[in-house]
Image (spheres, rainbow, N blue to C red):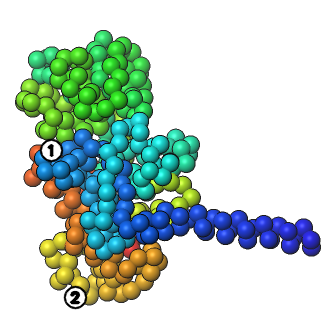
Amino acid sequence: MKLLKTAAAAAVVLLAAHGAQAGATFDAVKARGFVQCGANGTLGGFGAPDSKGEWKGIDVDLCRAVAAAMFGDATKVKFTPLTAQQRFTALQSGEVDLLSRNTTQTLTRDASLGLIGAGVDYYDGQGFIVKKSLGVKSAKELNGATVCVQPGTTTELNLADYFRANKMEFKPVVIEKEDEAVAAFASGRCDVYTTDKSGLAATRATQLANPDDYVILPETISKEPLGPMVRQGDDQWLVLVRWVLNAMIEAEEYGVTSKNVDEMLKSNNPVIKRLLGVTPGMGKNLGVDEKWAYNIVKQVGNYGEVYERNVGLGSPLKLERGLNELWNKGGIMYAWPVR
């Protein structure tokens, strides 16, 4: 009996400690009054300031959506530009609350860094861009090429794996900062630049002087599910970030947009009523206001709106939805149900 009582007491202590840890970031963000978001800083369409210094991109809008859910105000967010090598340390150390920086969700990152993925906001894959003057039509013609690549990325590993699997050789030119890697490629220091295909589209559209002089090769050599990451053990914060993303996707599926969200408050659809807080309970479960998802859609937009203005056909990147289309329209973007 004495052993059982001791074990029970220890379990209570452990549960209490876990509960305190689970709310650490959530409580800190709430007390501070804004979300500190780790973003890219140079990647158009995903995370970069424009000519007026205003941050824009899919990843940026996710951070704004978290702020809208947390505070009812999408402007309650600050951005920290991070390189690929800096990003995980910044999140681990608490420098940022949330990493939303075109980051691939992998087993190693989930299992060994003390971090955890909170969902996927863009399904991507790695590719290659070359100058048209090189005359290359396929990645399998790149034997002996010099390749610009960023360290500390899945890109670096995939590059080595692809060339090894195809019995080809290459010379890596490893450059930490993305804009410097692109500049090295443009100047001819390397024959090829490799990263996620969305990044290649952004590079060609926004960073290269004459976009028509470059071609993205047809091969996609990897799976790159990109999404936000938070620290492990901060369960309340993880749940909020996860459901912010799901709410944006769910809103698109049910036709709730930034333009019609006020009218949708009158909907008789039980899912829409729960999503927008007309039927209470979801906000309470998350520890935020019942209008959390309403505020997201009203101030930031649903997933489709965010996609279109940042990387879609109406943007400089002009990317088709592809895999990022909703599951019922031929893609694999599928929200967990809000119930």
Classify the position of the C terminus by image quarter: bottom left
Who's the residue at 28% across and 71% down the image? 73
In the image, taking residue 198 as reference, residue 215 lies left or right, namely: left
- Badge 1 amino acid: Leu
Above or below 78: residue 174: above
Above or below 28: residue 78: above
Who's the residue at 37% across and 32% down the image? 155
Give coordinates of residue 179: x percent, y percent: 24, 32
Give coordinates of residue 328: x percent, y percent: 27, 62
Mark 1 neighbour density, 10 Å: few (under 14) some (14–19) many (20 or more): many
**Residue highlighted by disc 1:** 317
**Residue highlighted by disc 2:** 266
The quarter of the displayed image where residue 187 is located = top left
Which residue ends up furthest to the front in the rendered image?
A: 32
Classify the position of the N terminus by image quarter: bottom right
Which residue ends up furthest to the top in the rendered image?
A: 144
Who's the residue at 31% across and 61% down the image? 77
Give coordinates of residue 162: x percent, y percent: 38, 25
Give coordinates of residue 67: x percent, y percent: 33, 66
Measure the alpha-carbon separation of dots 1 and 2. Answer: 36 Å
In the image, taking residue 9 as reference, residue 301 lies left or right, namely: left
Q: Nearer the viewer, residue 204 or 12?
A: 12
- Badge 2 amino acid: Lys
Q: Secondary structure at mark 2?
A: loop
Of the image marks 1 and 2, the number of the one nearer the N terminus: 2
Residue 321 seen in the current view: no
Mark 2 neighbour density, 10 Å: few (under 14) some (14–19) many (20 or more): few
Above or below 178: residue 321: below
